[in-house]
Image (spheres, grey):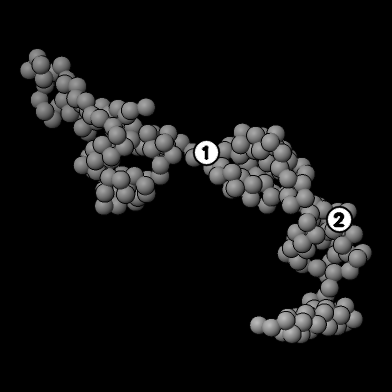
Amino acid sequence: MYLADYSRHTNSAQRLRQRNRIWGCGSDGALLWSDPENALCRKLYPDYEALKKALPHRSARAIEQHCSQLLLGDRRHGWTALEQTRLRRLYPTASREALSVAFPNRTLKSILRRAAKLKLMKKRPDYVLTGDPLLDSLRAECLRRNFSMQELESFARARGYFASQSWRGERGYYDYRAIVRGIYAMGGTLTIKWSEQYASGEGRLAGAWPGSEAALLRSSFRA
C-alpha cells in the first residue's frame, strides 16, 4: 500500500466523522455522546442506577461501555495492595452483597473481575455425610485439596460412580472397588483392624459385619 492510499483512507475517515457530528449519530444510527452526557458520566460514576435515570434514552450496556471508553473505573483508579489483600481475605466466604459493602467505591462487576484476575476461588461447602466412613473420609480429603467429584472420577477411573454420586437415593450403593481406587489415587492408604469377636471365636462373619466393610477398614491420607 502506497502513501497515497493511506492519505485517501485518512481523508475518508475524517469526512465520515465530520458527517456523524453534523447528523448527531453514527453510521449505525446510534446517537453520539454529547459533552453534557460525558459530564454526567464523570459526575455520577459508578452509580449506574443514577446514570440510567439521568440518561433514560441510553441502555445500561451502552452506559457501561461509554464509561469504560472515558477511562473511568479501574483503568483510572487501580486496585491498591490493601484492597487486594482485603479482597483475598473476604472473597472465599463473603456474599456478593457483603463484597459490595466492603468496597463501596467499586462496582460488583469490577470486584468479580479483579477476583478472577487474582484467581480467587469460593470456598466449597462441606460434603453431606453418606454414612460410610471410607467414602466420607475420601470426600473430606477431596474437599481439603479442592478436588471435585468429577476430578476424582478421572483419577480413579470409577466409570461414573463419583461423578453421578451413585450412593444417593433409595437405589444407592457403595462401590468399594471404586472407593478403594479413589483412596489410592488420592495418595491414601488402608489399614485393617480385626474385631475382638474373631479373636475369641465368638462372632460369626454375618453377625460381626455391621453393615459395610467400613467397620473394619480405615483410610488415612498423607498431609
Which structural element holds mark 2?
helix
Residue 27 showing in the rendered view: no
Q: Give the total number of marks visible in the rendering.
A: 2
- Residue 138: image quadrant is top left
**Viewer-closest of 166 and 70:** 70
Residue 123's disc is 1
Q: Label 2: how many residues lie within 10 Å, few (<14), some (14-19) or many (20+)?
A: some
The kind of residue on which mark 1 rests is: Lys
Q: Which residue is mark 2?
A: 42
Q: Quadrant of the C terminus?
A: top left
Instruction: Judge left or right: residue 197 versus residue 29.
Output: left
- Identify the residue at horizontal 60%, vertical 48% (top origin): 117
How far from the left and from the top, in percent, is residue 38?
87, 62
The kind of residue on which mark 2 rests is: Arg
Name the front one of labels 1 and 2: 2
**Viewer-closest of 35 and 123:** 35
